[in-house]
Image (tube, rainbow, N blue to C red):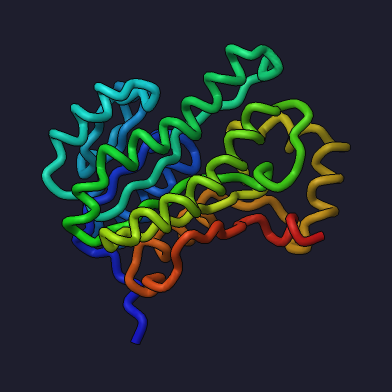
Amino acid sequence: MPDFSVEGKQVLITGGTGGIGGAFAKAFLEHGANVIVADLVIPTSGLDPRIRYASLDVRDSAAIEALAASVDKLDVLVHCAGRASREEYQPEVFADILDIHLVGNLRLANAFRPHLKSSKGCIINIASMYAYFGSPSAPGYGAAKAGVVSLTKSLAISFAADGIRVNAIAPGWINTALTRGAQENEEVNRKIVSRIPDGRWGEVEDVAGTAVFLASSAARLINGATVPVDGGYSVT
């Protein structure tokens, strides 16, 4: 029978204090995994004592190498850190967005490859529906996420020799602080919901469930894939 368990697995989540990243951390904890959360800024309150927290800038190769050196074992690497900006047509901002989402992804994969080789583990990258659609207000974010989909395929092929699976999740319209403005704009919200066959915004837990599945042995034949979690938005 398929084994959906992640109990006892060691999981590192970048961007793990955010909406989707936080849901990942909670889901893995509730399913028996040990969780390390790495983020640019670690809150001073409201932290879960079961989680190990580490301050990390994924643009900093030395910091990533230092974190890797401090981790003895790793089964699952989830790169969820990221940001968007209203100034992405500025080349320096565009480059920074790519550095965080895409180059940071490669830095992490390289640094933790030995750990994942030892555990025959997996990497879960976070893409977006904007990997497939143009994003006129966030060209850097869209380009970075399209790159994540392609990088996921390349890493899946390369890392397979070490027994490491690499997949990605492409969330759609998810109820987070980042999308609050769209939800509160009646016209924008109506257009979004009318296109989603499910007829509702996704919740962070919807995305987290997919991550737990991809980390389990039940997904052992899934490699190089990007799984849309968007209620059907991308097929309409």
Q: Residue 7 in the image: x percent, y percent? A: 23, 64
Residue found at the very far bottom of the displayed protein: 1
Q: Along the horizontal axis of the image, is 194 left or right of 131?
A: right
Nearest the eye: 207 or 76: 76
Q: Does any portion of residue 41 appear in the rendered image?
A: no
Residue situated in front as seen by the camera: 232 or 135: 135
Q: Is residue 89 left or right of residue 141?
A: right
Instruction: Look at 19% across and 61% down and name the residue there.
Output: 8
Tally the numbered discs: 0
**Going 33% across and 21% down the picture, which residue do you hit?**
60
| Quarter occupied by the N terminus | bottom left
Look at the picture and state if 95 lies above or below 136. above
Q: Quadrant of the C terminus?
A: bottom right
- The image quarter in which residue 228 lies: bottom right
Relative height, residue 83 to residue 152 (above, below): above
x%, y% of residue 85?
Answer: 63, 20
In percent of width and height, residue 130 lies at 68, 42
Is 42 left or right of 167, judged from the image as shown? Answer: left
Q: Position of residue 26 (x, y in %)?
A: 36, 49
Which residue is at a point 52% across and 19% down the rendered structure image?
96
| Viewer-nearest residue: 15 or 23 | 15
Q: Residue at x 42, y 58 (%)?
A: 157
Residue 191 falls in image quadrant: top right
Work out whether residue 59 can be spotted.
yes
- Which image quadrant is residue 31 in? bottom left
